Image (spheres, rainbow, N blue to C red):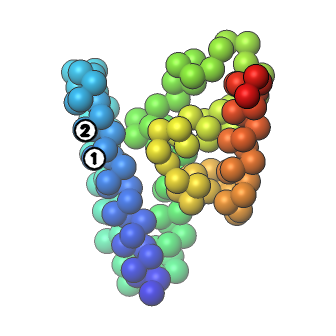
Amino acid sequence: MKALLISILIIQQVVIMLLVFYMKKQTGELNAFKYKHADCRRYIEMLIETVYTHKHNPKHLLEHLCDEMTVKKLLCYHIVAEDLDRLFRPDFNANKNDMLIYKLSEEGFSAKELCLLFGLNNLNTVYVKCSRIKKKLYPEQ
């Protein structure tokens, strides 16, 4: 059962990386994305190395994968972009992580994925954060 969950997590990350690559290609940003592609590849290699190293101990594997699948790591490897200014005004007053949760949610990340990436324990926390940001962004609604 644990091995299945671990496999699902790995597959999700690979799918996310492929989707990012596809979106960049479709929007004509592929040339700017080429240097990031090397970072994505390093991230995949690191995940593969982690699985290879800890595959005989599912508990350690899960711990290590959770450590590697954080928003901080995804930002470092350019899997996700922190371009908050695209969505928020410069004077927008909110926690940076909350804004990033909202942005990634709008880009299609599920509440479960966001809980894992941000180290949150409750799906409801993601919904509440997104709702509060949305109310600040669109107060007239």
Neighbours of disc 2 within 10 Å: few (<14), some (14-19), many (20+): few
In depth, the one of 7 and 64 nearer the eye is 7
Q: What is the three-letter code of the residue carrying label 2?
A: Tyr
Quadrant housing residue 87: top right
Q: Which of 134/109 is in front?
A: 134
The three-letter amino acid code for the residue at tag 1 is Leu
Give the image location of residue 37, x and y in percent. 26, 36
Q: Nearer the viewer, residue 132 or 37?
A: 132
Q: Are marks 2 and 1 in contact (CB under 8 Å)?
A: yes
Q: Which image quadrant: the C terminus?
A: top right
Which residue is pictured at 39% across the width and 80% down the height?
4
- The residue at the point 53 percent across, 63 percent down is 66
Q: Residue at x 42, y 73 (%)?
A: 6
Residue at the spot of label 2: 22
Instruction: Report whether residue 130 is seen.
Output: yes
Q: Name the spot of residue 79 as percent of width and height, x first.
A: 40, 40
- From where the camera sits, is residue 46 visible? no
Residue 35, position as x, y percentages in the image: 27, 28
Task: Determine which of the numbered discs, if any, sits on residue 18 in the image.
Answer: 1
Judge whether 94 appears above or below 79 on screen: above
Residue 120 in the figure: left or right of residue 46:
right
| In this view, 105 is above or below 11 | above
Per the image, label 1 sits on a secondary structure element best described as helix
Disc 2, SS: helix
Q: Is residue 32 above or below residue 16?
A: above
